[in-house]
């Protein structure tokens, strides 16, 4: 299967976007002072659930971005 150049760029951009968004989210989660993420200095269930979501999103963003990159490389070899 060959991906179009447009789809390959979209997948790569989506992977990068996912990393930017979730890194920012994790930084904000760690610095949380509202009491949702930490209670008396200990991580709460909210923290662990959202950290798990971020890790899964990092993995999926990496996979999707890698597919886009491979698609672009394959198109470059054909030219």
Image: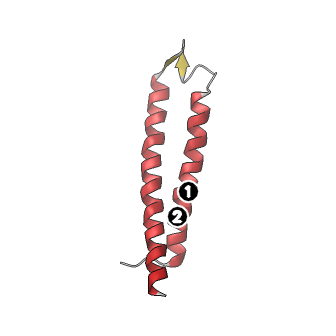
Of the 4 image quadrants, the one containing the N terminus is bottom left
Front position in the image: 54 or 69: 69
Determine whether 57 is above or below 74 in the image. Answer: above
Answer few, some or many: residues within 10 Å of disc 2's Cα (few below 14, many 20 plus, some between 14 and 19): many
Determine whether 59 is above or below 39 in the image. Answer: below
Q: How far apart in space, not on screen, are marks 2 and 1 (Cα)?
A: 6 Å
Determine whether, in the image, residue 33 is placed left or right of residue 59. Answer: right
Considering every residue shown, the one lying at the far front of the view is 77
For label 1, the SS is helix
How far from the left and from the top, in percent, is residue 77? Answer: 45, 82
Q: Residue at x 48, y 67 (%)?
A: 69
Q: How is the image coloured?
A: secondary structure
Picture quarter containing residue 9?
bottom right
Determine whether 23 is above or below 73 in the image. Answer: above
Q: Residue at x 50, y 72 (%)?
A: 7
Considering every residue shown, the one lying at the far bottom of the view is 79
How far from the left and from the top, in percent, is residue 36? Answer: 56, 23
How far from the left and from the top, in percent, is residue 67? Answer: 43, 65
Q: Residue at x 44, y 62 (%)?
A: 66
Picture quarter containing residue 70?
bottom left
User: Is label 2 in contact with label 1 (beta carbons under 8 Å)?
Assistant: yes
How far from the left and from the top, in percent, is residue 34? Answer: 63, 21
Considering every residue shown, the one lying at the far left of the view is 1
Kindly identify which residue carries mark 1: 16
Front position in the image: 76 or 2: 76
Kindly identify which residue carries mark 2: 12
Answer few, some or many: residues within 10 Å of disc 1's Cα (few below 14, many 20 plus, some between 14 and 19): some
């Amino acid at each position: 299967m060959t991906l179009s150049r447009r789809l390959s760029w979209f997948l790569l951009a989506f992977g990068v976007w996912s990393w930017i968004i979730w890194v920012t989210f994790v930084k904000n989660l760690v610095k949380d002072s509202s009491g949702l993420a930490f209670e008396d200095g200990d991580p709460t269930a909210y923290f662990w659930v959202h950290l798990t979501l971020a890790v899964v999103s990092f993995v999926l963003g990496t996979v999707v971005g890698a597919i886009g990159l491979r698609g672009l490389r394959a198109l470059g070899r054909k030219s």
